[in-house]
Amino acid sequence: MSDERRLDVLRAIVQDYVHTREPVGSRVLVERHALGVSPATIRNDMAALEEGGYIAQPHTSAGRVPTDKGYRAFVDQIATLKPLSPAERRAIAELLDDAVDLDDVVERTVRLLAHLTHQVAVVQYPSLSRSALRHLELVPLSPHRLLVVIITDAGRVEQRSIETAAEIDPGGIAELRARLNVVCAGRRLTSLTGPLAELPEQFAPEHRALVEAVTEVVTDTLRQEAEERIVMAGTANLARADLDFPRTIGPVLEALEEQVVLLRLFSEMEADAVAVRIGAENHHEGLVEASLVASAYGGPDTEGVARLGVLGPTRMDYPGTMAAVRAVARYLSRILAG
């Protein structure tokens, strides 16, 4: 839409409808918004917006409501996001700073996001496929038992133990630990298979069995833990928004139960700081009346290592939701990088 005035009218309709859930008429727009034009002009603009598919008339109501196309135009023209209030920022810091490990961080994050937005919050666990190895630790537990600890740059920790036939030599373990970190630290986990396979040849024959056992357990762990998973909170918020789903919330709940659906949506989202999918843009029958607002977190590049987001009805406070998602993603990234 090139007409700025009509965009102002659309913006006012979206804001009023999101706030009141009532179809918006021209008289209400004149009373609530300083649009600087006559009621007749606003009626003409609304007619043009309806003809363009940006607003629609529900049933016999005199007012209009935004369509998916209207919400999309509204979201696309949001140039800057209003920062969260000091109280909201404090709530994020206080809740997440006390987390004790990655599982706790993820659980706190998803509850916080649901609380801030009053929608369903979804957090994807940091993906091993896009993570880099921060450190690999070897800890002798007994003369014949070794603990292998894999730590990623996203704060994910995996532990495996190895039983050895020969007695563990602390000096040999120190050398192996050092060489493993030279080879692995800072590299994407998906690129480690080759370097790990070559490592045993760098050691004396009597140490190769242990080296092979360690590299094998690291490789197997990365392969086994590649499965993506997500956590959710705030599903009860959908029940409170039941009126915003003209059919039923059943299809939305069913889609939420299929984690593969949400993971696919996350993977298809643009690499923007905050991406928004509205209604039919989700390409899933159960989510044609829902919107998803998501952002990447946990990595220095634009893709991050995972995503978090909020799912709710298309009648959503997009600026507020987008600001909350962006703020939580940024704070979570800083925690995991620390």
Image (cartoon, rainbow, N blue to C red):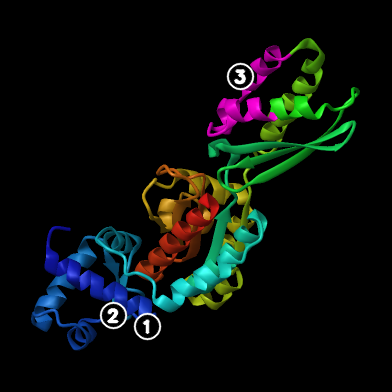
* Mark 3 in CB contact with mark 1 (< 8 angstroms): no
* Mark 1 in CB contact with mark 2 (< 8 angstroms): yes
Badge 1: residue crowd in 10 Å (few <14, some 14–19, many ≥20): few
The residue beneath circle 3 is: 194
Q: Nearer the viewer, residue 178 or 76?
A: 178
Q: Is residue 211 magenta?
A: no
Residue 248 position, x and y percent, is: 55, 68
Badge 3: residue crowd in 10 Å (few <14, some 14–19, many ≥20): few
Q: Secondary structure at mark 3?
A: helix
Question: Horizontally, is 313 left or right of 185 in the view?
Answer: left
- Tell me which residue sits at (35%, 69%) in the image: 83
Q: Amino acid at mark 1?
A: Thr
Q: Quadrant of residue 131?
A: top right
Q: Quadrant of residue 84?
A: bottom left
The residue beneath circle 2 is: 24
Residue 289 position, x and y percent, is: 46, 63
- Tell me which residue sits at (37%, 76%) in the image: 18
Kindly identify which numbered label has been placed on residue 20. 1
- Tell me which residue sits at (16%, 68%) in the image: 6
Q: Amino acid at mark 2?
A: Val
Point out the stretch of residues depicted in magenta. 177-203
* Labels 3, 2: front one: 3
